[in-house]
Amino acid sequence: MTYATPSDHSRAIRFYHRGEIVSVSGVQSTRSVLDWLREDARHTGTKEGCNEGDCGACTVVVGELDAAGQLQLASVNACIQFLPTLDGKALFTVEDLSQLAPAGASCCGGACGSGTQPQLHPVQQALVDCHGSQCGFCTPGIAMTLWNSYESHQSAGTRPTRQQLADALSGNLCRCTGYRPILDAGERMFDLPDARLDRAAVTAALQELAKAPALAYSAPNPAASPARSDRFHAPRTLDDLAALRLALPQARLLAGSTDIGLWVNKQFRDVGDLIYVGQVAELRTVEERGDQLWIGAGASLEDAWRALAARAPTLTDCWLRFASTPIRHAGTMGGNVANGSPIGDAPPILMALDAAVELRRGAAVRRLALTDFYLDYMKNALQEGEFVQAITVPLAAFARQIRGYKISKRFDCDISALCAGMAMELDGDTVASVRLAYGGMAATVRRAAQAEAALLGQRWDEAAVRAAQAALARDFAPLSDMRASSAYRLQVAQNLIQRLWLETRATNPLGSDATSVFSVMPHAAA
């Protein structure tokens, strides 16, 4: 199927949708997947709620092949995904579910006796059986999140716990039904007749799409004055990306569009030419290289956080409370670091782990400590034509006592009032080394130098805690804003040093069962 306009003059965006390969051309490079679905393709099952990736009403599932050629599915927010990022991938929406329903199924499980009713997928049937929908506006997004969980667990031969379902649904808000019947439906769907995606057919389609050259898309931007064409490049190799970045230093790098998507939707910003890093396989790698954990700048937040939490389980809370599952599937840790927001949750943790960034310009690569990367509010040390290639963490850092603390008004899917990454080494009862890094306390994420100095070489006791708390007031003078007051931020930041002591003191330290809700519930990390 082809969707085109008279202004079609570039290589089309091609992806798998509704059982066939779709070609789209002539649309702006910042056209969202949601707008294309509803306004162009007229598939209106996917809903628009917040239009900023928070509510989950627009949740769809994207499929792509991993390095081993296996199909991987991930739920994402259609409202902030730009259509060209779908090139070479598969798009699944709520309309697909009925096509996957088991033979002979009906909307009521056969109770109505009608042979004309539409068939329902086990996900849909379970939502009906468990009264998991009232107004129904959020239901399509919830159904797609549940379908993603259904497919992943069926393929693995496992069944999710109730907490795993709750973790998966962290990005789906429902204001009228309540979450108990939705979670009931998530458990119920595995008891119904099996209905599986034909993964072989999808894989074959994606293999066919992969034969096309890398996407270099151009389309008119009617909002620009004078009118111009914006280019969207999707290089597939790291060398091609480096060359493009040198040739187009003013183009914006795009990864998960979890930030840039809001610039377009909410601020109506003109983002111009885009270079998309999501097709560069090398950048999506997370692996141990020598004595370092190497996190490619294009690796998803989910994969990057999983790697950190696997080596430091105390970071699980930060992982599962970082935004929502669809945001973690789309966004990248490299983007979170390069963005430089003072309230980003990854930089404080990485800073406490002595992380560095690999910066590439053409063929040249240099390494810079993350503590030296941020120069001022939303300003970093990148040179023209340079980009973040990877984040590296010394494996030795994971031998320390490591903690990550996120403070926010909502437990799930919320921006931090402040976030802290802390790491400590003790020699007996003496502090041999310490890292205290905070986000939300200054114009940039940074370490608390005076509080660290107050602890280093001291006996790890309550007196040291009090000294560090007093020094912290000299390290930071936080601002007041809509998320927290200055006094609150400082008080909580000081309290977190006390919490670190309670959890790491030599006598009767608090266990994870007293400090982490995830430690007493099986969750997505299981």
Image: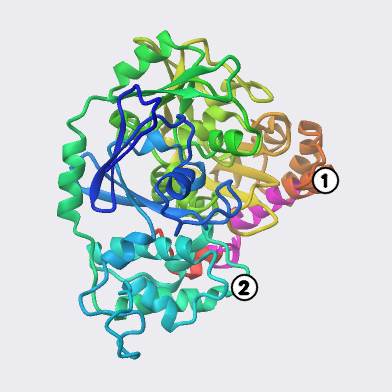
Q: Magenta part of the protein: which range?
A: 494-516
Q: Position of residue 473 (x, y in %)?
A: 81, 37
Tell me the distance, in whole angstroms, between the alpha carbons under discs 2 and 1: 32 Å
* Circle 1 Cα neighbour tier, 10 Å, few/some/many (<14 / 14–19 / ≥20): some
Answer above or below: position of 149 versus 18.
below
Residue lying at 33% horizontally and 22% vertically, measured from the top left: 10
Q: Which residue is mark 1?
A: 485
Q: Locate residue 334, reporting x and y percent.
A: 46, 32
Q: Which residue is more in the foreground, 211 or 463? A: 211
In this picture, is 283 found above or below 497?
A: above
Residue drawn at x 54%, y 37% as measured from the top left:
261
Q: Secondary structure at mark 2?
A: loop
Does any portion of residue 294 appear in the rendered image?
A: no
Residue 520, numbered circle: none
Residue 455 percent location from the top left of the image: 68, 38
Q: Is residue 274 left or right of residue 149?
A: right
Q: Secondary structure at mark 1?
A: loop
User: What's the residue type where badge 1 is placed?
Assistant: Ser
Amino acid beneath label 2:
Cys
The stretch drawn in magenta includes residue 501: yes
Nearer to us in this view, 523 or 516? 523
Residue 148, quarter of the rendered image = bottom left
**Which residue position is annotated with label 2?**
176
Badges 2 and 1: C-beta atoms under 8 Å apart?
no
